[in-house]
Image (cartoon, rainbow, N blue to C red):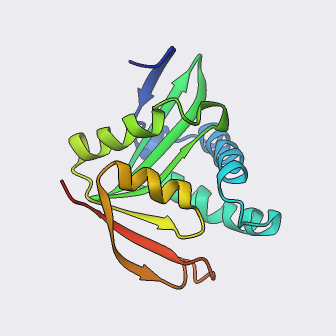
């Protein structure tokens, strides 16, 4: 249990057998809300087309960290090896320190050193820069081959 500003939150790390369809569906809905509020370059069709990829990633990512407040999922982060693969916060909790706490947890507890950011999401890029990450590579396409340039970042302390 942690306190982030005035919010009492619980951090849950379910293994893959505890990732029920109900949990995955709830996290996909949280992802959609977060993406609609932060990824303005994505169309409604883009978002719908990404859902199967997101659903699969949530089921299979090595480490899934879920943040709950009052039994409601308000954020999650996925980690594979030393990379933050996904970090999404419910828009109502933007700017309250939840993302910062999760990234600190990823660095300190999981040894994360890498993250990829959509170039068209400058708020996320600036957030990770403030957390100590710097660009080391840029790609024209995302991992699914979509024309969304990616900035690959590495932690420099």
The answer to whether 123 appears left or right of 33 in the picture is: left
Along the line of sight, the residue nearer the viewer: 155 or 105: 155
Q: Is residue 137 above or below residue 113?
A: below
Give the residue drawn at x 66%, y 42%.
30
Figure quadrant of the N terminus = top left
Give the residue drawn at x 33%, y 48%.
131
Along the line of sight, the residue nearer the viewer: 121 or 10: 121
Q: Is residue 93 above or below residue 132?
A: above
Residue sitting at the far left: 157
Indicate the position of residue 83 as horizontal and vertical percent values. 33, 60
The answer to whether 6 appears left or right of 129 in the picture is: right
Q: Is residue 8 above or below residue 105?
A: above
The answer to whether 140 appears left or right of 26 in the picture is: left
Give the residue drawn at x 58%, y 36%.
94
- Residue 153, visible in the rendered structure: yes
Indicate the position of residue 29 as horizontal and vertical percent values. 70, 44
Q: How many marks?
A: 0
Give the residue drawn at x 42%, y 80%.
138
Indicate the position of residue 66 as horizontal and vertical percent values. 48, 36
Indicate the position of residue 42 as horizontal and vertical percent values. 72, 66
Q: Place residue 65 in its image quadrant.
A: top left
- Residue 143, visible in the rendered structure: no
């Amino acid at each position: 249990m942690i306190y982030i500003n005035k919010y009492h939150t619980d951090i849950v790390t379910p293994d893959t057998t505890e990732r029920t369809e109900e949990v995955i569906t709830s996290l996909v809905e949280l992802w959609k809300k977060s993406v609609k509020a932060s990824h303005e370059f994505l169309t409604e069709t883009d978002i719908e087309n990404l859902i199967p990829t997101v659903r699969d990633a949530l089921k299979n990512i090595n480490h899934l960290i879920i943040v709950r407040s009052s039994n409601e999922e308000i954020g999650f982060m996925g980690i594979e090896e030393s990379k933050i693969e996904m970090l999404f916060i419910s828009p109502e909790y933007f700017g309250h320190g939840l993302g910062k706490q999760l990234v600190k947890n990823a660095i300190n507890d999981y040894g994360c050193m890498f993250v990829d950011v959509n170039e068209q999401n400058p708020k996320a890029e600036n957030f990770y820069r403030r957390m100590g990450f710097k660009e080391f590579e840029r790609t024209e396409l995302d991992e699914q081959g979509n024309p969304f340039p990616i900035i690959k970042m590495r932690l420099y302390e």
